[in-house]
Image (cartoon, helix red, strand yellow):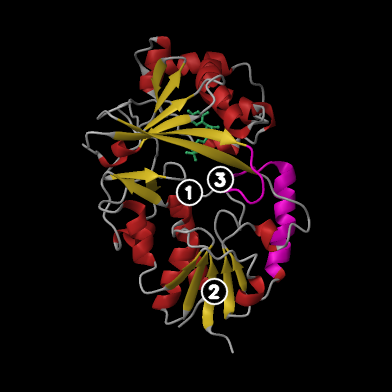
Amino acid sequence: MFIYDYLIVGSGLFGSVFAHEAKKLGKSVLVIERRDHIGGNIFCEEKEGINIHKYGPHIFHTSYHDVWDYVNQFVEFNGFVNAPIANYKGELYNLPFNMNTFSKLWGVITPAEAAAKIAEQRAVIKGEPKNLEEQAISLVGTDIYTKLIKGYTEKQWKRSCTELPSFIIKRLPVRYTFDNNYYNDLYQGIPIRGGYNKLIEALLDGIEVRMGVDYHLSRALYENMAKNIVYTGAIDAYFGYRLGQLEYRGLRFETERLEKENHQGVAVMNYTEREVPYTRIIEHKHFEFGTQPVTYVTKEYPADWKPGEEAYYPVNDARNQTLYRQYADMAAKEKNVIFGGRLAEYKYYDMDDIIKSALECVRKNVSL
Ligand code: UDP
């Protein structure tokens, strides 16, 4: 009576990896997708030879050998290394925080001088850091906190840094070397020839995908179609928001075509002052070393989020985490439904972690 072994709700990275692996194990799979394209937020739109990251910049980076080997079966990577620039009121600084940043900021020459400067500034924090502000100051001191962190973070999250959890800032490395690589990982890059779309297309090759299907609107039709469901949408939406809504931060993008070859000379420029309303400008061609005569740039504005809109960042504060735990307990009791990915696990996931978790999930749940 079931038509498929697996119904996969959502064609983002989690859903696509799961679908691919389940099919390889001989399972019949149907993927449904609410949007009119596959790939979730890693989807790119090609214009004049430039892949535009429609849902914010995605740079693949990982230290997991198995995940790196996994993605390289489908696409080749171009060696792009993310080295974003912070623009604070027209002053430019290298990110992540490293000797180039320290030297520009304070005129210091050696790592010891930089460390002494930071030690002097972090003395204002006594004991264990209790929030993002204290965590940031204890990592890099007050000057960097004020110029490069406070404004950016508060506009992105629309909360004071004293009310945000410190783990958000722990994503950023602090280095006493002249190394502008934003990530600490072993491997990094953007897929060559076709970008992320090619990765998703390869994962979903030979798999039936129905686009423009909203699971919540067509549940009666779909929920009995397969023995198992892999749900990658928002966990609170799955339960009809019964216990209340989980909060997200939204984003709004403004993309422009410019009649010039090179606008800002770097793929990502962060605007770290509070007064500039966007957090960053992306110049997409630089992700792929593009040489086209024109360029496309996107301003990324943080935005409030309402249910029904694209959800970007889970707001992992105490209230939301508690609510998520309650939904997760309900999810654990759902028979034959797997919840996976950023929205279903309410987690600020990087792409490699998503792939790793999808592969583990298949290993645990699907057998030949
Ligand atoms: N951040 C900052 N200044 C910057 C870049 C990042 O203060 O110029 C902080 C900010 O709090 C942000 C966090 O670091 O939310 C994580 O940044 P990341 O670049 O990892 O965010 P993503 O690329 O996932 O949006």
Q: CA distance from mark 3 to mark 2?
A: 24 Å
Mark 2 and mark 1 residues within 8 Å of each other at the beta carbon:
no
**Mark 1 lies on residue:** 350
Mark 1 CB in 8 Å range of ligand 1?
Answer: yes
Between label 2 and label 1, give the one nearer the viewer: 2
Q: Earlier in the sequence, mark 3 or mark 2?
A: 2
Residue 323 belongs to magenta span: yes
Residue 307 belongs to magenta span: yes
**Mark 2 lies on residue:** 7
Residue interval drawn in magenta: 304-332
Residue at left offset 62%, top offset 26%? 133
Please give left or right for residue 48 compared with residue 233 in the image: left
Decide if residue 267 is in sight here: yes
Measured from the top left, where is residue 220 in percent x and y? 66, 75
Q: Amino acid at mark 3?
A: Tyr
Between label 3 and label 1, give the one nearer the viewer: 3
The quadrant of the rendering that contains the N terminus is bottom right
Residue at left offset 66%, top offset 22%? 126
Residue at left offset 24%, top offset 30%? 261
**Mark 3 lies on residue:** 312
Mark 2 CB in 8 Å range of ligand 1?
Answer: no
- Is residue 272 depicted above or below 316 in this figure? above
Q: Amino acid at mark 1?
A: Asp
- Is residue 106 depicted above or below 293 in this figure? above
- Residue 48: image quadrant is top left
Q: Amino acid at mark 2?
A: Leu
Q: CA distance from mark 2 to mark 1?
A: 24 Å
Q: CA distance from mark 3 to mark 1?
A: 12 Å
The quadrant of the rendering that contains the C terminus is bottom left
Decide if residue 169 is in sight here: no
- Neighbourhood count class around disc 1 (C-alpha, 10 Å): few under 14, some 14–19, many 20 upward: some
